[in-house]
Amino acid sequence: MKNLYPKNFKNFKNLTIKDSILFLSIIFLLILISIANQKSKKIPIAISKQETALNFNKKIFEYINLGNKRLIVSWLWIQTLLESDHQQYKKRDANSWMFLRFDTIVSLDPLFLQAYRVAGPYLSVIKDDIVGANILYNKGLKIFPDDFYLNFYAGNNYFFELNDMENAYKHFERIQYHLHAPKYLPSIVAKIKAQMGDLQVAYDLISAAYKMQPADSDLKERYYESLYAIKAEIDLNCLNSNSKYEINKKCNIYDLDGNRYFINKSNVYDAIKKWKPFRINKFISK
């Protein structure tokens, strides 16, 4: 039978107790290091997608596409969705990698409606790239000016992120009675006008929405409360801008319920019913 032991196996027989202890100590130390290595938390090396994303100059694809724009757009679109990340972009310089990728896509295919609808909200809400989202909304609305979703998303971006009431109003007003519009939208449109100082326009907008509601609608009741508040503010501003003894003939002295305004303890005109300024809550000064 062949000897399966290594030729120098006999040397193990000559190990001293000291060598054996040293050998076992080394084995034990290696086991401890292995266990510690497994349990220890490794510090990940994190490199942001913003640093590693590959973006080509869109003009390259515009001039050199060999008639395959749609193929390039499809490839870019799929790659962008697969590689998308949630890291917010705060620089406000329209240079986030996802904005550049989306911008290339819609430059190659301006009629790609879904790209505008998906890219805008993603950039605004997830990436916090407000400027990039706004650029894409404006590009999309030049081609699809009446698209409900683009107007709604752009209006929200202007209203909540950019605090641009004038542009928010422009987009919301266009779609306030659209089939897909939320029921509160006419009220928002009117409140924006009130915030901009156009109380009479706000009153007319709410009045139109009020007339469109069924008699037993809860929304109709809310609209009535809004109308009361707007009218009260208009009337009381008029009454209190003049001497209480010399009421301007243009001032209305009755509220929406038909009750006469009165002079309160502070010596100014007031309404019998409690009301608050018809404004968007975050803009009401306390």
Image (cartoon, helix red, strand yellow):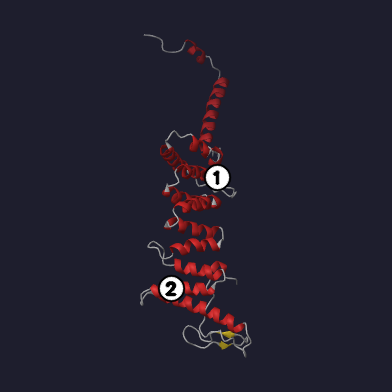
**Which residue is at 46% across, 77% downward?**
225
Question: In which quadrant is the N terminus drawn?
Answer: top left
**Which residue is at 42% across, 74% downward?**
210
Query: Does 244 appear above or below 72?
Result: below
Residue 190 in view: yes
Quarter of the view holding residue 218: bottom left
Question: In which quadrant is the C terminus drawn?
Answer: bottom right
Query: Does 22 appear above or below 151?
Result: above
Which amino acid type corresponds to the residue marked 2 in the rendered image?
Ala
Image coords of residue 112 (percent x, y): 42, 47
Image coords of residue 123 (percent x, y): 50, 50
Total marks shown come to 2
Does dot 1 land on a helix, a strand or a loop?
loop
Q: Using the numbered discs, state the Cα–Cα distance from disc 2 to disc 1 in whole angstroms.
A: 43 Å
Residue 55 in view: no
Mark 2 and mark 1 lie on one chain; the one further toward the N terminus is 1
Report the disc number at residue 208.
2
Image coords of residue 264 (percent x, y): 59, 87
Quarter of the view holding residue 70: top left
Which amino acid type corresponds to the residue marked 1 in the rendered image?
Ser
Query: Does 252 appear above or below 56?
Result: below
Image coords of residue 235 (percent x, y): 55, 81
Mark 1, Cα crowd under 10 Å, few <14 / some 14-19 / many 20+, is many
Does dot 2 land on a helix, a strand or a loop?
helix
